[in-house]
Amino acid sequence: MKITDVRATLLRFDGPAWMDALNVIGERRVVLVEVETDGGLVGLGEADALGAGHLVAAAVEQDVRPLLVGQDPALIERLHDLLMRRLVLRARRGPVMAAIAGVDIAVWDIFGKDVGRPVYQLLGGYRDRVAAYASGGFYAEGKGLDELAAEARGYVDRGFGAMKMKLGRRPHELLFGADRCRTAPRDDLERVRVVREALGPDRALMVDVNTCWDVPTALRLGRQLEELDVAFLEEPISADDVAGSARLAAALDLPIAGYETELSPAGFVDLIERGAIDVAQPDVIRTGGFTACRRIAAVAAARHMPIAPHAFASAVSTVANLHFLASLPNGGLLEYCQYPGPLMDELLIGMPPVDADGTVALPTGPGLGVELNRAVVARFRV
């Protein structure tokens, strides 16, 4: 069997505006990747749009496709290293790395379909059900403490055992130095108190700062978050400040999770080995696909560190990271995106739901165990 074509499809959905610490996002862009073979099998993947979906789609078709057409899709490790070596000047991070990730997911999907087994079993297979958390708690116009508490109670009613919320939003432009983190800490801490109360003592609460703090701010607020029983603090500072993150991890009992903004496998190994994180968060649609992320997970497992991947794009991203987590002995919680819209809710046929106990069952079909809803693809195709 040989690869005959590799193509990318860019989708766009204009939805309600939401905010994290740094951005206002009113649209979702998704880059679907499909790999075709002469045996009739087609693999599905997703490449993270990274805020520049047209560049990622171009990287799939202009950089990756010429190297893969004619190759045997079963030689997955070889194909991954071929792409990383031949594209080394532009593949270590950014759009080309995301393109490689999307293709890698698709060839694993082909492998599963060819042998009739789900991907998570081919990756090693550890569990057939994964606990999920509701990834929400965004900032939005007109969304106050009452609305935030109601959102949290809604997740409890749906069976989620954990929730993640955003912190650190500030109304002015980005600044640097001492002025960079003019947050209103009392407001942020009040947001956490309200959500903590709404969730109750038996459900986990995580917070995500999206890199907006500096080290002193993270130390000061991190100590107060410990008192509010927060399970982990995600991306408190820039992923480039590995030494600073290591200081935080050493000083706080609150686990440091990260860094979704680190797309390089070598960068994740550096974070792990230097003690800069307590929870590793690679994303299979960003950081080289299953092949690269399972290497990161092996390094983390050797240091008894859990994996809780970033997964905040389309339903394909969620399913791919679900398979990844289910294959790991050190697999943690699955991020389940709560941004509303058809690219999460309608894109896939066979999308596994979150059950009443807050877990997600693995698809039993071969490969990823899902298929695209072509009507939805046509509706949102750019």
Image: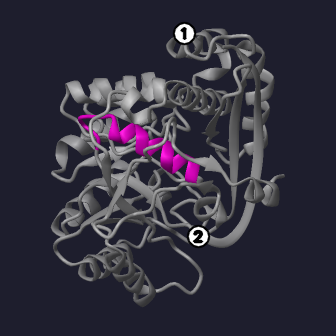
Question: Magenta residues?
Answer: 315-331
Main SS class of the magenta portion in the image: helix
Q: Is residue 207 or residue 307 the one in the foreground?
A: 307
Q: Is residue 286 or residue 183 the one in the foreground?
A: 286
Asked whether, in this view, residue 319 is left or right of residue 243, the answer is right
Q: Please tell me which residue is depicted at 48% across the width and 35% down the height of the picture.
A: 262
Return the x and y of residue 90 as percentages of the image width and height: 67, 21
Return the x and y of residue 362 as percentages of the image width and height: 39, 48
Asked whether, in this view, residue 329 is left or right of residue 322, the answer is left
Q: Secondary structure at mark 1?
A: helix
User: Mark number for residue 78?
Assistant: 1
Q: Is residue 39 visible?
A: yes
Q: Which residue is mark 2?
A: 340
Mark 2 and mark 1 in contact (Cβ < 8 Å)?
Answer: no
Return the x and y of residue 176 as percentages of the image width and height: 53, 51
Circle 1 crowding by C-alpha within 10 Å: few under 14, some 14–19, many from 20: few
Residue kind at label 1, given as amino acid type: Arg
User: Mark number for residue 259?
Assistant: none
Return the x and y of residue 25 as percentages of the image width and height: 65, 64
Q: Is residue 280 visible?
A: no
Instruction: Relative to 61, say whether 192 is above or below.
Output: below
Instruction: Relative to 274, say whether 44 is above or below.
Output: below
Considering every residue shown, the one lying at the far bottom of the view is 146
Residue 131 figure quarter: bottom left
